[in-house]
Image (cartoon, rainbow, N blue to C red):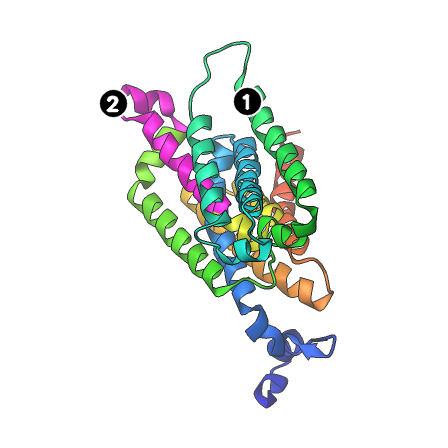
């Protein structure tokens, strides 16, 4: 403590007090939530570059809703057989976590298919895939109103209090997803940016597209139960958008997106403590600030051309 007080910057940041407790004192309580937020931000921001480049933002939104429906269905079935919601919540790996992953992965496989029917466009399918699960989830929450608090904790996440089991699953998911992308980086890039040429070269474009969507679905389904659906979607879209407005080099875009995402998670979490703000919206708003440099760069370029 004495050492920190002697360093102006550290003392100002870590020893700020809220409700009788400094941020440094609260770290043992908050550390799992901070680590989970950083891990989610890192992986989501990395995958977000693909999401933006492939223009599948609403695919990720639909997968998020379908994953949430899987969680709600797990609680509905369990309560039907006489189990209490708190008991189901404790079975993170074998209960709602498992159904969330299954629902999300099935959705990813279906949404990866090309739609040839002219009357039912891909946009229509995405709209149905987003709205119908959202409505069903709300109906289930209404049916289980007595258990709503326990369900909402795992459905929408609790960024402050993340269990050790959740953090372990989150880290394992991140390692697995990043390892897959390390091994298949060239294939993912080629099939994402130029699918026609990739197909002509004999590459199994549909297969790599499905694997890519499965990694996105797996990340979303696990992450929403750690920090909530809203910040996960924000980390999947905003950092990548900010990065792609600042650079045209793909490797730089991945790097910048990850830096923006992780920074938003850390700063947003800190601001939520200092100003007693909801953690998810604080991280989302912080991520939005990284859009400013790219926006200014775009305005300057247009002004020069004009």
Mark 2, residues whose alpha carbon is within 10 Å: few (<14), some, or many (≥20)? few
- Picture residue at 43% right of the left edge, 56% below the top: 169
Q: Which mark is residue 202?
A: 2
Q: Considering the numbered disc 1 on the image, is that residue within a helix, a strand or a loop?
A: helix
* Residue, far left: 202
Circle 1 crowding by C-alpha within 10 Å: few under 14, some 14–19, many from 20: some
**Marks 1 & 2, CB-CB < 8 Å contact:** no
* Residue 157 visible in the picture: yes
Circle 2 sits in a helix, a strand or a loop, which is it?
Answer: loop
Whether residue 6 is situated above or below residue 97 in the rendered picture: below
Report which quarter residue 275 is drawn in. Answer: bottom right
**Residue 232: image x %, image y %?**
56, 47
User: What percent of the width, then of the height, locates residue 76?
Assistant: 58, 43
- Mark 1 and mark 2: span between their CA atoms? 29 Å
Picture coordinates of residue 99 (x, y %)?
Answer: 47, 43
Residue 239 appears in the figure: no
Instruction: Look at the image and tell me in which quarter the N terminus lies.
Output: bottom right
Of all residues shown, which one is farthest toward the front? 82
Tell me residue 34's x, y (percent): 55, 63
Q: Residue at x 50, y 42 (%)?
A: 48
Q: Earlier in the sequence, mark 1 or mark 2?
A: 1
Q: Nearer the viewer, residue 261 or 146?
A: 146
Of 292 and 219, which appears nearest the observer? 219
Chain part drawn in magenta: 193-221
The quarter holding residue 25 reads bottom right
Q: Which mark is residue 66?
A: none
Q: Is residue 249 left or right of residue 119?
A: left
The residue where tag 1 is placed is 125
Outermost residue on the top side: it is 118
């Amino acid at each position: 403590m004495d050492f920190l007080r002697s360093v102006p910057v550290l003392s100002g940041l870590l020893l700020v007090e809220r409700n009788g407790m400094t941020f440094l004192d609260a770290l043992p309580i908050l550390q799992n939530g901070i680590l989970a937020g950083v891990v989610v931000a890192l992986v989501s921001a990395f995958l977000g570059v693909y999401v933006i480049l492939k223009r599948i933002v609403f695919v990720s939104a639909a997968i998020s809703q379908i994953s949430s429906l899987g969680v709600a269905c797990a609680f509905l079935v369990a309560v039907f057989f006489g189990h209490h919601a708190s008991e189901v919540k404790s079975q993170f790996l074998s209960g709602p976590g498992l159904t969330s992953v299954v629902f999300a992965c099935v959705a990813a496989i279906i949404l990866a298919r090309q739609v040839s029917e002219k009357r039912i466009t891909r946009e229509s399918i995405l709209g149905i895939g987003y709205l119908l699960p959202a409505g069903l989830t709300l109906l289930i929450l209404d049916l289980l109103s007595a258990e709503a608090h326990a369900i909402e904790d795992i459905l929408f996440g609790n960024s402050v209090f993340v269990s050790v089991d959740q953090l372990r699953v989150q880290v394992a998911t991140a390692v697995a997803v990043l390892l897959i992308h390390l091994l298949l980086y060239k294939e993912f890039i080629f099939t994402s940016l130029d699918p026609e040429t990739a197909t002509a070269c004999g590459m199994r474009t549909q297969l790599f597209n499905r694997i890519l969507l499965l990694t996105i679905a797996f990340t979303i389904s696990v992450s929403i139960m750690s920090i909530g659906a809203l910040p996960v979607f924000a980390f999947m879209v905003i950092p990548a958008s900010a990065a792609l407005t600042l650079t045209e080099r793909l490797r730089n875009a991945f790097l910048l997106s990850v830096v923006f995402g992780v920074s938003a998670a850390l700063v947003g979490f800190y601001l939520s403590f200092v100003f007693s703000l909801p953690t998810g919206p604080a991280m989302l708003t912080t991520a939005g600030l990284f859009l400013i440099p790219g926006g200014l760069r775009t305005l300057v370029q247009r002004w020069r051309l004009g």
